[in-house]
Amino acid sequence: MRNIIVKVHSSKANLKKKDQLAWKIAEIASDKAKINKDAVEMVINRIIDNASVAIASFNRKPVLSARQMALAHPRKTGANVFGLNSKIKVDCEWAAWANGTAVRELDYHDTFLAADYSHPGDNIPAILAVAQQKGCSGIDLIKGILTGYEVQVNLVKGICLHEHKIDHIAHLGPSVAAGLGSLLKLNTDKIYQSVQQALHITVSTRQSRKGEISSWKAFAPAHAGKLAIESVDRCMRGEGAPSPIYEGEDSVIAYVLSGPNKKYIVPLPKVNEPKKAILETYTKEHSAEYQSQALIDLARSLNKKITNLSDINKIIIETSHHTHYVIGTGANDPQKMDPYASRETLDHSIMYIFAVALEDGSWHHVKSYTPQRARRKSTVKLWRKIVTRENKKWTKKYHDKDPKKKCFGGKVIIKMKNGSSISEEINVADAHPAGKRPFGRKEYINKFKTLTDGIISKKESARFLKVVQNLKNLKSKDLKGLNVEVMPKIKRLSKSSKGIF
């Protein structure tokens, strides 16, 4: 690996292409790096994981809306839409829109946390859609996905968007563009221009994850993927982009992020070094914000130790800066304590999540979010006894540069009415690579079968799992096999809505 220093340069300095971050990203996207065997296996895991959550969300309203928009753009040699027969094809950018929304809707796929947040699995829908439309092979797809992960993970390590209230899809646009460059074997200059265009048009604010969170949270990464596809298309036709997009005196670092005096350090592999960043990412066992995963596991454990929850006087969760200020009481969002809040808001409230997991001793991607569940009197009462606090120890663990030492948990102190207290802590979620029950292929398959049960047939489940695990050997005609079709009775539950398309 190498550390790239990124800072603002005046226009007079005429910063050379080869010294720009976008060019260095493009260099690794266009290199001839060997494929790491473990990384390939993780690509397969991630495709299985994405399919799991996409199919489970098939008839949720944002997914339905996105799918109907996509179906208004049919194409004979296009890409597939998750859940539909593979004979149905649409323009790849619209497939990316529909499938990206389906993957993101339940907040239930993979994550990587460092200086900023990310869900690197958001790279896959756009890269897969283009691969299907352009007749790419399984190996091409693997290379594209590995590049997408590599770029996003390392941007997340080096550049914090959150402190400037910029949504994390600003790292996703460039990563998808780079991944598409690898997939399509584009030259370095075309990828360089694509990365710049994609960043320029995917900068948006974090209001999408603040206050009253709407369904845009599900659409946002799909939007970035769609825009990245369009950026690559333009650059393949010879168009350029605002440049230098990171280092320019009026560009992203100068006026969106920390300003002209800031130096960022972004790690990137050397040219032709195998891309293994995907191995640093981790999936979710529970459908909720990643920083709640470990605390859900802790709540499940505590459920067995507290006989009467009404005897609780107060619950204090000591955790990292990010957890406290994003999904804790430090966010100062009254909506996070509101029983009438949207599902999207509730899954960003650790107070709500911990209360439900503590009461139920479990977590469910549908049942734990129903209006009836959120408004249960005992839950609301317990919910409002919970506060979060930042503890510097947990913030330091959160930012540890060693992936094996990085922690996303916290310490829970439960004060009882009789004056006694219970105190327990957890470093990482049980499903984390360093957790009690790390996810492997068996767990990914089990998650897929659990989430798709009653939605797809057993025959379809077996077919998909066989195809995806043979990813390295798939020919262009085989990539449609990575689509999963739901049963007819599930399709009949889809309700149409009207728009412009």
Image (cartoon, rainbow, N blue to C red):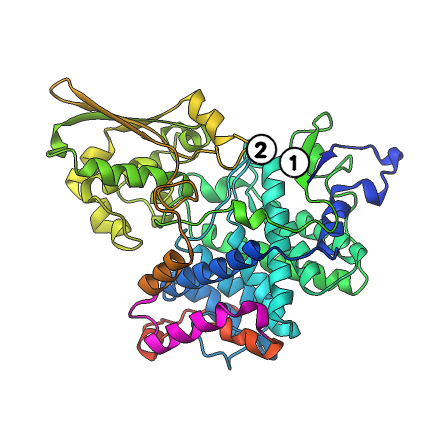
Query: Which three-letter amino acid code belongs to the residue tagged 2?
Result: His
Q: Is residue 227 above or below residue 316?
A: below
Residue 449: percent from the left, percent from the top? 34, 65
Residue 274: percent from the left, percent from the top? 66, 51
**Among the 4 quarters of the image, the one containing residue 106:** bottom left
- Between marks 2 and 1, how big is the CA–CA gap? 7 Å
**Residue at mark 2:** 164
Rendered residue at 81%/62% (across/down) = 238
Residue 428 tag number: none
Residue 68: percent from the left, percent from the top? 47, 70
Question: Residue 18 vs residue 390: left or right?
Answer: right
Badge 2 crowding class, 10 Å Cα cut-off, few under 14, some 14 to 19, many 20 or more, is few
Residue 501 visible somewhere in the drawing: no
Residue 266 visible somewhere in the drawing: yes
**Residue at mark 1:** 256
Rendered residue at 51%/68% (across/down) = 69
In front of the other: 358 or 274: 274
Range shown magenta: 452-474
Q: Residue furthest top?
A: 419
Question: Residue 166 vs residue 353: left or right?
Answer: right
Quadrant into which the N terminus falls: top right
Q: Is residue 417 above or below residue 291?
A: above
- Magenta stretch: includes residue 457: yes
